[in-house]
Amino acid sequence: MKKIALIAASLAVLANPIFAAESAKNTTTGAAPAEAKFSTVSKDEMFSSKLKGLSVTNQKDETIGEISDLAIKNHEIDALILSVGGFLGMGEHYVAVSPSSVNVRYDSKDNKWLASMNTTKEALKAAPEFKYPK
């Protein structure tokens, strides 16, 4: 009798409309518009999720900042927004730097991304401050 009750309860849970709606969310229907363009992405490409929060070091291997955001203009990265100084979010200074001034590379030996820049923390603190537009 317990087996029958357990089976009936399981079927009731599976027939629940919430599960049906969840399963419908996981299916793809329709077709992409004709103007949609698709790409393939290789495993060694850089993703913004890997850049954000990445520490930036200088030639002396000192941490001089952290990549906090990307500015995109005309479908290209226009600037990397670096957070310089501060502690636990207090007193942070943001600076927009050209992507060409930051060397981002993958270290396969240590299995991690690295970013470096030929400057000092003091120079970044003295640079014009970037403020997010309102």
Image (spheres, helix red, strand yellow):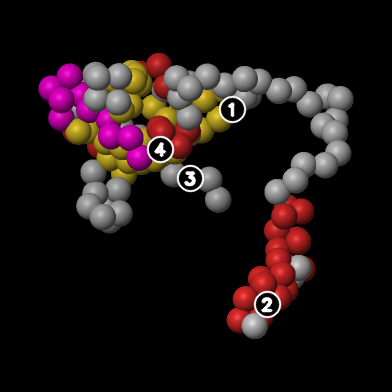
Residue 134 percent across, percent down from the top left: 55, 50
The quadrant holding residue 75 is top right
Which residue shows up at 31% across the image and 28% down it? 112
Is mark 4 in CB contact (under 8 Å) with mark 3? Answer: no
Q: Which residue is mark 1?
A: 73
Query: Would you name the residue on which mark 3 appears?
Result: 132
Single out the mark in the foreground, 1 or 3: 1
Q: Residue furthest bottom?
A: 1
Label annotation for residue 4: 2
Q: Secondary structure at mark 1?
A: strand
Between label 4 and label 3, give the one nearer the viewer: 4
Q: Magenta region, mostly helix, strand or loop?
A: loop
Residue under circle 4?
Answer: 52
Q: Position of residue 18 (x, y in %)?
A: 72, 67
Rendered image quadrant of residue 16:
bottom right
Judge left or right: residue 8 versus residue 46. right
Residue 57 within the segment the image draws in magenta: yes
Q: Do callouts 4 and 1 mark residues in contact (Cβ within 8 Å)?
A: no
Note whether residue 133 is visible. Answer: yes
* Residue 109 image position (x, y, % from top left): 24, 19
Mark 1 or mark 2: which comes first in sequence?
Answer: 2
Q: Where residue 72 sits in the image (x, y, percent)? A: 55, 30
Q: From the image, state whether disc 4 or disc 1 is nearer to you.
A: 4
Disc 4/disc 1 C-alpha distance (Å): 18 Å
Residue type highlighted by circle 1: Lys
Residue 124 visible in the snapshot? no
